[in-house]
Image: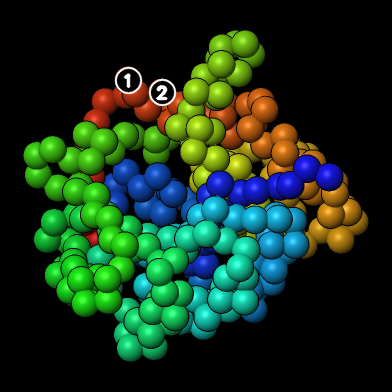
Amino acid sequence: MEELVARRLAIVPTTNCSLNCKLCMDYLSGPVKRRDIPLEDVCRDIDACFALFDRVVWLQFVGGEVFVYRDFAKLLDYALRYRDRFDRLIIETNATVFPDEAGRQALLRHGDALSIYVSDYGELSRARGKFDQFAREHNIHYVVKKYHGDGQYFDGWIDNTNPHDLKEPGDVLEVNAMNCPQCRLRNMHCYDGKLHRCSNSCFMQEMGLFPPKDGDFVDLRDVSRSREEKREIIREFYTHARRSCRYCKQKYMAILPRYPAAQQLKKG
């Protein structure tokens, strides 16, 4: 049987965030509820994912903001049981919150496999200096994406905050969906018991934008489907457009206008 490999498997333990971005691509400034997934449920989903995949190249933890998750250190330690099954552990952060001692020690237990990716939003990323120092002191692979001032990473953000049916003809939709950066990156997202082909599929489903369609995601907690049936759905993830692709402008990333990143909505 052909090996099933996840190029990127992003686990989302929380949609709570320390920022309130106007153009949030996860719709956390709008209809998607901000909440923590209980630790035992996230761990169960990690088990389910590794029961389906033979190997994971990048295991990622993303949010929201991962360092506001109260059980993050325990979650990192739980991932260690699969250390021989993934190549790298990627932590993505906006550098607004620096982990406590327990969190820092849990990070270091992943050794040379650890990478920290910082989205640097200038003054908003108030813990950036602490992350810089931590990475230097412990020789951690460390990547900073600049999202403030001139020369922003990828020229800034796009506006994908009003998802609606773009009414593209079927053949046009299929071509554009295959050229989407999310499709090319194969960045799967696991959130609250469901494995999606990309973050947009994940969070648009959370919005209730359209009814669930069989094959658009894998219900990790569905005991009526066999392991091989679930693996076959995953193998088909990137072969054609999904329901979310009809509503998503990210497939036009190369030509869409850019906006300054992380513009904050006023409270109240």
Q: Are marks 1 and 2 in contact (CB under 8 Å)?
A: yes
Residue 237 in which image quadrant: top right
Q: Measured from the top left, where is residue 23 in percent x and y? A: 32, 43
Q: Is residue 147 left or right of residue 230?
A: left
Q: Is residue 104 left or right of residue 168?
A: left
Three-letter amino acid code at disc 1? Ile
Q: Is residue 178 left or right of residue 233?
A: left
User: What's the CA distance linking mark 1 and mark 2?
Assistant: 6 Å
Q: Which mark is residue 255?
A: 1
Visible in this render: residue 96? no
Q: In the depicted view, which residue is nearer to us: 234 or 15? A: 234
**What residue appears at the point 14 percent right and 47 percent down from the top-left corner?**
148
Query: Quick check: 104 above or below 211?
Result: below
Specify the quadrant that holds the C terminus.
Answer: bottom left
Q: In the depicted view, which residue is nearer to us: 144 or 15? A: 144
Q: Say which element carries label 2.
A: helix
Three-letter amino acid code at disc 2? Tyr
Counting other residues with Cα less than 10 Å from the Cα at mark 2, is it few (<14), some (14-19), or many (20 or more)?
A: some
Q: Measured from the top left, where is residue 88 in percent x and y? A: 48, 60
**What residue appears at the point 31 percent right and 62 percent down from the top-left corner?**
141
Q: Measured from the top left, where is residue 161 in percent x and y? A: 39, 38
Q: Measured from the top left, where is residue 140 in percent x and y? A: 30, 68
Counting other residues with Cα less than 10 Å from the Cα at mark 1, is it few (<14), some (14-19), or many (20 or more)?
A: few
Q: In the depicted view, which residue is nearer to us: 227 or 208? A: 227
Residue position marked by numbered label 2 in the rendering = 252
Specify the quadrant that holds the N terminus.
Answer: top right
Visible in this render: residue 41? yes
Q: In the depicted view, which residue is nearer to us: 73 or 222? A: 73
**What residue appears at the point 33 percent right and 88 percent down from the top-left corner?**
101
